[in-house]
Amino acid sequence: MWLWVMNFIVGLGQMTLAGAFASYYWAFDKRKDIPVFPVSSSFARSLRYAFHDFSGLNSYLKTINV
């Protein structure tokens, strides 16, 4: 269980940072299109849209790491 939780936290952090950087990279007009709090917005998107897929992948990675 401990290994699953640690992998989940690391993966969620990586996904959050990737979403924050992607929101900057793909913004057409940097002043208008970037959210006020890009990391918080990316964290909310990660939990909202990819939580289920990420949990399943994390269970798979746990079996490989052991």
Image (cartoon, grey):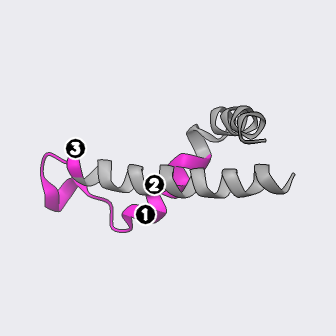
Magenta segment, which residues?
A: 25-47
Residue placed under numbered mark 1 in the picture: 39
Residue at the spot 19% in from the left edge and 57% down from the top edge = 32
Residue placed under numbered mark 2 in the picture: 42
Comparing 45 with 53, the one in front is 53
Residue 52, quarter of the rendered image: top right
Residue 13, quarter of the rendered image: bottom right
Left or right relative to 5: residue 37: left
Residue placed under numbered mark 3 in the picture: 26
Q: In this view, does 64 lie above or below 8?
A: above
Main secondary structure found in the magenta portion? helix
Comparing 5 with 19, the one in front is 5
Task: Please tell me which of labels 3 and 2 falls first in the chain.
Answer: 3
> Residue 59 placed where, x, y %?
76, 36
Give the distance between the C-alpha atoms of the residues marked 1 and 3, in whole angstroms: 15 Å
Residue at the spot 64% in from the left edge and 38% down from the top edge = 54
Q: Is residue 60 above or below residue 26?
A: above
Any mark on residue 49, and which? none
The type of residue carrying mark 3 is Trp
> Residue 39 placed where, x, y %?
43, 63
